[in-house]
Structure formats: structure tokens, C-alpha cells
Image (cartoon, grey):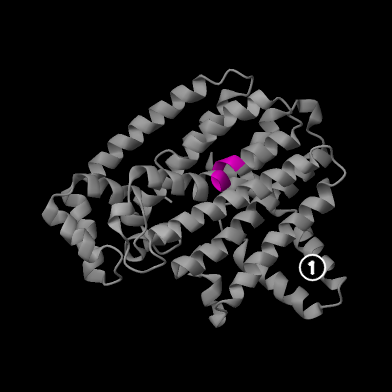
Amino acid sequence: MQVMIEEKSREMMAIWPDIVRDIIDAIKDLNIPDVATWMEKVLEYNVLGGKKIRGLTTIYAYKMLIRNDQLTEDNIRLVRILAWCVELMLTFGQILDDIMDRSLVRRGRPCWYRYNDIGAAAINDGTLIENATFYIIRKYFKEKDYYINILETFHDVIFKTLMGQCLDMLSTNFGKKPDLDLFTMDRYKSIIESKAAYCTCILPIIAAMHLAGIKDPEMFEQATPVLLEIGRFYQIQDDYLSCFGNPEVRGKDDTDIQEGKCTWFIVVALQRATPEQRKILEECYGVSDPEKVKQVRQLFTDLNLLDAYSTFEEETYKLINVHIQQISCGLPHNLFLDLLGQIYRRTS
């Protein structure tokens, strides 16, 4: 499986220079070479270096959804371009997210806003990438009958992701001491569905469905709730990895406890905590002091949250499998099963 992923990643990388050239040429047409030079650096630093899972998922989904006689060289090129649009959109969100979360490391390197003390100027760079994405979509898909559908999918996912980001920041009290009374499971599910599930699962699969020419509303109606379940599952795994995973393997620092994030672990901890344990959380959660972070992690362990998470992971995996088997609109079950299997028990 890993060999196949690496091969597909190389195939996707083969057209990356074309994507960069398209964006840079559009800037050069405005006769602003300094911006063109800067933008090339922004793209190379921020877009590359990840596993490209969402982009590769877009390609995989498209190939599963079309007939073999549609696998022409032109169509494969188009889906690879669309895959890079998905990756560009993800990068836009990550640049802004790192600033708001005051993260230090992304993909094993300093976050862009920390690179050479770029600071708040990184906000403009992230927005440039967002708009470059729509430039590429317009350049390659404007004449296609699915153009509006793809455009609306990207806009819809951005809108929902930004709302999730807003709810996330409201929950942390904008980096100040969080109000733990707000940390309910319903609120948590709203955050991860909007902030993570749409860009992780909805965007690549739904975009691929539009590219494949699917028009049946029932197919989209049956695909969406299952994809949201898988996306929520992915984010809860992220919460686990952020708290108990290896930062070197993940290539990023983990600041959920320090930032006072509304995560699966703090929500379940608050449900289980005694009054004395809750006082510890109120004192320590959302504080950057390493000793207080250590106390929170220890409390999570004392509350048997690792066992609870393991049980939750197994039960959720089985439940999503059942929901996939209930899809009756003609979409291939393996598309969803493979997506779920790819993230099940992941370590990074």
C-alpha cells in the first residue's frame, strides 16, 4: 500500500511545476516580478512536504467513479490539477490556523509566520494561496459543465471551515483562559465537523464526484453524512495524537492543552472528573506552563481516557462500516471503506 501511495505521489508531483508556473505567470502578467518571486517561495515552502493525502484521495476517488474508457490522459491530468487545488486550499487554512494557534512547527519546519520573522504578513500569503486556487480552477475548468459545482464545493467548504475555526477560537476565549463550562460534546462535534471534516473528507470526494460527472442528488445526499462521520473520526484521532502521539513522527508541535482547545479528551475528562479533579483542570488547562501541561496529561491518564479512547475508536470504526454498507445509491462501498481504512489506527 505504501509503495502505491509513493508512486501516486510521484505522479501527482510531476505536474506541480506546471501549477507553480501558471500561478507565477499570472502574477508576471501584472508586471510585478517581486511578488512573483515571493509567491514562488511561499508555494514551495508551504504546499510541499506533506503526505498529500487529500489530493491523492481526490485522484483515487475519481478513478473509482469513472469508467475505464474515461481514463484518458487529459482526464487524468485534470484530476491531478484538481488534487493540487485541494492541497492548495488546505495550505491556505493551515497557514492561518498556525498563526491563530501560535503553533511553532508544521511538517518538521518552522510555521510560515515564524520563518524569517514573517509574522502577520503570512496572513496575506495564505490569502494569496486561496485566490491562486480559484485562479487555477477557473483556468482549467471554466469551460466544463461541472465548473460551477466544483466552484461552489470549494466555496462552501471554505465557509464552513472558517465558521468552525471561529467556533474553535470562541471556545478557547481567543487564547485566554477558556470557560470549561462551554466544553460540551455537542459543541465539540460542531467544531470538528465544520473545521476539519469538510476539508478532510467532503472536499476531495465531492469534488471528485463532480469531476466524474455525477449529477444524481441522492448520491451526494448519501455520501455526505458518511464522509462527515469519517472526517469527525479523523479529527478525534488527531486529538489523541496531539496529546499522546510523537511530535517527531507527526512533524508538528502539539499545543491543544496549552491553547485550551476543546478536544475529545478534555470533554470526556470533564464528564468523568471529580470536583477535585475539575479544579486541577480549571487551574491547569489552557496554560503554557510545562508542569501544568504535565498535570493535565497525568489527569487524563488517571481518568482512564486512553482506554476510553481505544474503546471509542473500535466502536466508531465498526459503526461507520455499518453505515457504509447501508449506502444504496450505487456509489462503490470500497471508496468509503478504503478512506476509512487509510486513517484507522493511524500514527501521524
Does the image show residue 333?
yes
269 or 336: nearer the viewer: 269
At horizontal 71% and vertical 25% (from top left) the residue drawn is 216
Q: Quadrant of residue 233?
A: top left
Asked if residue 28 lies left or right of residue 111, the reply is right
Asked if residue 284 lies left or right of residue 219, the reply is left
At horizontal 78% and vertical 44% (from top left) the residue drawn is 78
Q: How crowded is mark 1: few (under 14 residues within 10 Å), some or many (20 or more)?
A: some
Residue 316, given in percent of the width and then of the height, sits at 38, 32
Q: Is the magenta stretch mostly helix, strand or loop?
A: helix
Q: What stretch is highlighted in magenta?
A: 198-202
Q: Is residue 324 above or below residue 163?
A: above
**Magenta highlight on residue 56:** no
Does the image show residue 44?
no
Count of numbered circles on the image:
1
Q: Is residue 344 above or below residue 300?
A: above
Q: Which amino acid does label 1 sit on?
A: Ile
At horizontal 80% and vertical 30% (from top left) the residue drawn is 70
Secondary element at tag 1: helix
At horizontal 26% and vertical 65% (from top left) the residue drawn is 293
Residue 25, given in percent of the width and then of the height, sits at 84, 67
Residue 259, given in percent of the width and then of the height, sits at 36, 65
Q: Mark 1 points at which residue?
A: 24
Asked if residue 343 lies left or right of residue 279, the reply is right
174 or 314: nearer the viewer: 174
Q: In which quarter of the image is residue 315?
A: top left
Residue 5, given in percent of the width and then of the height, sits at 58, 44
Q: In this view, does 319 lie above or below 31?
A: above
